Amino acid sequence: MQRPYLLSKRNNGIWYFRLPHEKTFHSTGKTAKVKAEEFVLKLISGQKLERTTLEAYSQDFFVWGTCRWVKRQSARGISLTPLHVLNRRRTLLKHILPQFGKRYLDTLNPVEIDDWLIGLPLANQTKNHVLYTLKTIVDEAEREGVIATNPMKKVGRLADSHRKRDIFTLSELSALFPTDAGKLLTIWQNEMWAALYLLLATTGIRPGEARALQWRNIDLIRGGIYIVQALDDKGQIKTPKSGESRAVPLPTRTWDSLKSWEAETFLPNADDWVFYGVDKKPLSKKVVSTHLRPALKKAKIKIGDRYIVTYSFRHTFNTFARTILPIGTVQEILGHSSDEMTEWYNHPDLSDTMKTLLPFREQIDKILDDSKIST
């Protein structure tokens, strides 16, 4: 007797079925044909089907080399790193399974999920990571036919709530960058770190742009740098955020600091990284960020409830520069874009741009002066 349904096994190892009056296949959630047939027969006869908990369904989710969803993304040409997958797995284990792991997938409620997310003591950005992780799992359950309806379609993202970065005071910059060489090295450990952070403080360039500098980007004859590339959070080279290369003049003291570091570095060639770690590779975002807090402590700077991070140097430079320099010059140095700047900026040769900016060096030197910090 012919079966009143069709079975088909997909590349993911799951058996799918289709009833005679249907055009599409549905997942049985089973890898064994016998189990798949039992599933379909129960469905046809109206018997109570075996239900799956979130914990059981997500047992292999976000496990590198095992997760069917990860393998499918790779087959579709979507690049996922082991670290990305591991972070999703950690989110699943830390936040989602303790709350919903024992629940059957078909009992997940969008209102309950939404209320739970809002009540989590986490930043909205982190909550959205949790939401994305759970949504990925439930979306896959719907795709495989494990559940008939997807409650996650009714749960929306939370508004991003990036905390505004605070700036340093002039006296704090003076404490971080004392003119006494011995005190400076005590705070920053060595010439490289002193040069890197002085560069961030007195030019306002992005940390990712500083990490991507090679000696061929440093013009120690004219006294400036050329921002032609940046490093992202994963250490991959990309274009600057503005999409344009730019020239940035160096304040006198920063110029001297980079020359001193050039004389000491083990990697002085044109294609070598200016700032590097023990593996001679460019510094990671995390390494640069974690180096700031000990320096603040050594400089006896108390930040209280202010949000002080590496990017605060860029905000500080912008705040003081706008009181001294023309707005167009500030935008040029920082790589900010606007409709007016797009029309004004005509992609000249970077060395020519440097010549137009060098006359402002004396004014840039005064940004952090006021007899509090010598630049």
Image (cartoon, rainbow, N blue to C red):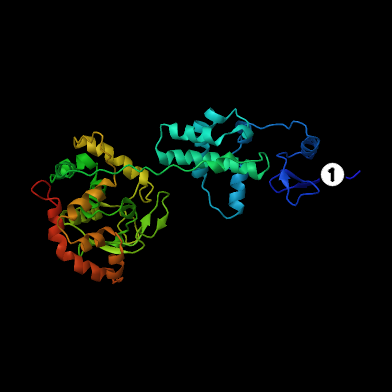
The image quadrant of residue 227 is bottom left
Q: Residue furthest left?
A: 371
Give the side of residue 166 with respect to residue 17, left or right.
left
Q: Is residue 221 above or below residue 315?
A: below
Residue at left offset 23%, top offset 36%: 303
Between 133 and 358, the one lying in front of the other is 133
Asked which secondary structure carries label 1, the reply is loop
| Quarter-of-image position of residue 236 | bottom left
Q: Residue at x 52, y 44 (%)?
A: 82
Q: Quadrant of the N terminus?
A: top right
Residue nearer the viewer, 276 or 300? 300
Q: Residue at x 28, y 52 (%)?
A: 265
Viewer-proximal residue among 301 and 346: 346
Tell me where residue 291 appears, x and y as whole percent. Answer: 30, 41
Q: Looking at the picture, which amino acid does disc 1 mark?
A: Pro
Q: Residue at x 60, y 29 (%)?
A: 103
Instruction: Report x, y in % for residue 213.
Output: 32, 57
Choose between 110 and 93: the one closer to the eye. 110
The quadrant where residue 221 appears = bottom left
Q: From the top left corner, tell me how far across and down residue 164 is, in percent.
A: 30, 44
Q: Which residue is mark 1?
A: 4
Residue positioned most to the right? 1
Residue 136: tell me if it is visible: yes
